Image (spheres, rainbow, N blue to C red):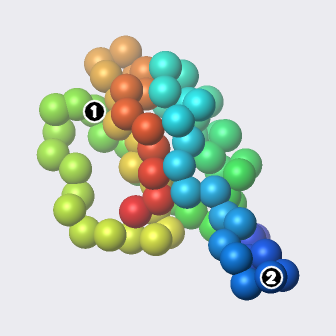
């Protein structure tokens, strides 16, 4: 699995949130996130399941409803 490199100027050019996928089907959202950040994994949680409270910089949590539609902006962590 490839790892995205930071910008040459020392800045961090890695995408860390995906507001555009809210309203998408979860698998389509996961494909988009994997396309943007192949270095992270995606975890799926259906509301109202409690979310993990630990921070993991190699994970993106996708929160969906009972129709598998993303209801919250996925973010790294």
Secondary element at tag 2: loop
Most foreground residue, 15 or 10: 10
> Split into 4 quadrants, where in the image is the C terminus?
bottom left
Q: Mark 1 points at which residue?
A: 46
User: How far across and down, in percent of the image, does residue 48 sit?
Assistant: 16, 32
Residue 13 position by quadrant: bottom right
Is residue 20 placed above or below 37 in the rendered structure?
above
User: How far across and down, in percent of the image, does residue 49 sit?
Assistant: 17, 39
- The structure residue drawn at horizontal position 22% and vertical position 50%, both measured from the top left corner, is 51
Q: Name the residue under label 2.
A: 9
User: How far across and down, in percent of the image, does residue 68 sit?
Assistant: 41, 22
Is residue 16 placed above or below 3 in the rendered structure?
above
Q: Which mark is residue 55?
A: none
Mark 1 or mark 2, whichever is nearer to me: 2
User: How far across and down, in percent of the image, does residue 63 sit?
Assistant: 35, 36
- The structure residue drawn at horizontal position 53% and vertical position 49%, both measured from the top left corner, is 17
Q: How far is mark 1 from mark 2, CA to CA? A: 39 Å
Most foreground residue, 32 or 16: 16
| Neighbour tally class for label 2: few under 14, some 14-19, many 20 plus, Cα within 10 Å | few
**C-beta proximity under 8 Å, tags 1 and 2:** no
Q: Is residue 60 left or right of residue 15?
A: left
> Split into 4 quadrants, where in the image is the N terminus?
bottom right
- The structure residue drawn at horizontal position 65% and vertical position 40%, both measured from the top left corner, is 31
The answer, for residue 1, to whether it is visible in the render is no
Most foreground residue, 43 or 17: 17
């Amino acid at each position: 699995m490839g790892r995205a490199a930071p910008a040459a100027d020392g800045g961090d050019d890695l995408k860390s949130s995906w507001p555009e996928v809210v309203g998408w089907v979860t698998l389509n959202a996961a494909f988009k996130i994997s396309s943007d950040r192949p270095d992270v994994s995606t975890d799926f949680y259906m509301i109202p399941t409690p979310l993990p409270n630990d921070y993991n910089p190699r994970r993106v949590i996708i929160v969906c409803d009972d129709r598998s539609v993303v209801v919250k902006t996925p973010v790294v962590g």
